[in-house]
Amino acid sequence: MVQIEKEVNPHFEDFLFDWNQKFQFLVGGYGSSKSYHVALKLILKLLSEKRTALVVREVYDTHRDSTFSLLEEIINELGLDHQIRCVSSPMQIRFPNGSKIIFKGMDKPQKLKSIHNVSLIWLEECSEIKYEGFKELLGRLRHPTLKLHMILSTNPVGEDNWTFLHFFKDDRNKRLVLDDQDLYAKRTVIVKETFYHHSTADDNLFLPASYIEQLEEMKEYDPDLHRIAREGRFGINGKRVLPQFEEWSHEAVMDAVNSIRKPIERVGMDFGFEDSYNAVVRMAIDHKNKYLYIYWQYYKNHMTDDRTVVELEEFRISKELILADSAEPKTIQYFKQQGFRMKGAIKFAGSRLANTKKVKRFKKVICSSDCPDVVRELKYLTYKEDKNGNIIPDDFKIDPHTFSAIWYGLDGYEVSDLKGGSVSVLK
């Protein structure tokens, strides 16, 4: 057994030798040394046990200047370069006991089919890998006798990324594995078969103070990047479309709606079938205070019109007016024939931007917790950006069907009446 002495960051000491869990998930800010310690952990394990380890990134060619060069650097630091061979073409690292590290990219999935007896996988920058790729790799992790392990490392990204949804919270599917705030507080957490580890630049004792100062400066010019790079926390990546959006309990929302002196009630509907959704929202407007309340939702796809009519029967009975997507006149006509009050909202060139600005003019957009799909789509809704990093004001990172339903429901209403405009009340 080779005797190795190596000074490491104290926050990573337990992680280096803990192999009790199948999954090890490391998230942290820039310069926290998480990738370094994952690489060191791999080397130590493969020196002590004969294994085949697979290192994966989304793009194969990025290995050469990242994982491969990092592993080679550590091998040289340990003085093991005379024992461990780093082969550059194709990239592979071979150990004296028969262990080896192979490198693959998810951009060449056909190459994964030739992999056998892999008992250890490292997914570097796992948030860049697609969820389907992660599940494919789980199927490749198999060995007849050795215990299986998968290490995932990443900088934090948006809470809509599969890594957050799988390892932390998926509100849409009502699934909670671990509250990320608990991880930030405790730094390491074990939940069933997963070891969680959080780190920041403060955990890297070998960093110069000037580097941390640069990370701190981000708070002034890019708060989102500061959260990712300095704090190492998941959150919202990009500029929020509705920063005034709030989620309240259903009881609190209804109490507020019932206290409005003259509420303006609206219903909006967006149509969808395959990849999009039939989305219906009930809203109440407090015009005096410029508050928009959303207190009821319907959200389903793969629904034919005849089935949707049955599920929305209460609107036929109540005779509430539904303002819907005018791009579907045939569907609107069908609903009207079934006894619904429905009309198409006015659409025109630039209406997406105009409608987005209209909703942004509310001082608050308050949504009931009974509307989980509205919350999921709007709470973290962010703008798309062009190649120069500028926001595209009428395009978003997801297709928010509930937002479209709100647009249509507000047709004819204007939030601001500062110029003497009147409030439109539809009959």
Image (cartoon, rainbow, N blue to C red):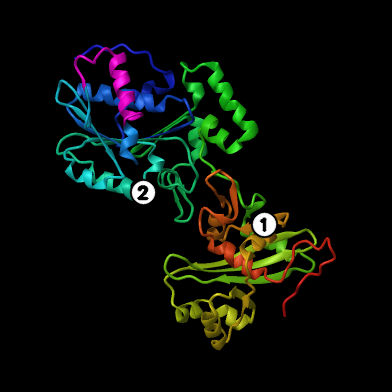
Q: Looking at the image, is mark 1 or mark 2 earlier in the sequence?
A: 2
Indicate the secondary structure of the residue bearing disc 1. strand
Indicate the secondary structure of the residue bearing disc 2. helix
Image spot of residue 192 (x, y percent) = 35, 39
The quadrant in which residue 427 appears is bottom right
Q: Which residue is mark 1?
A: 365
Q: Which residues are magenta?
A: 64-85
Q: Residue at x 40, y 23 (%)?
A: 12
273 is higher (above) or lower (below) than 1? below
Residue 296 colored in magenta in the image: no
Q: Residues within 10 Å of mark 2 (few under 14, many from 20)?
A: some
Residue 83 colored in magenta in the image: yes
Horizontal side of 417 relative to 30 (left or right) equals right
The quadrant in which residue 22 appears is top left
Q: Which residue is mark 2?
A: 131
Q: Residue at x 27, y 23 (%)?
A: 43
Residue type at mark 2 is Tyr
Residue type at mark 1 is Val
Horizontal side of 71 relative to 303 (left or right) equals left
201 is higher (above) or lower (below) than 348? above
Q: Residues within 10 Å of mark 1 (few under 14, many from 20)?
A: many
Image spot of residue 194 (x, y percent) = 36, 37
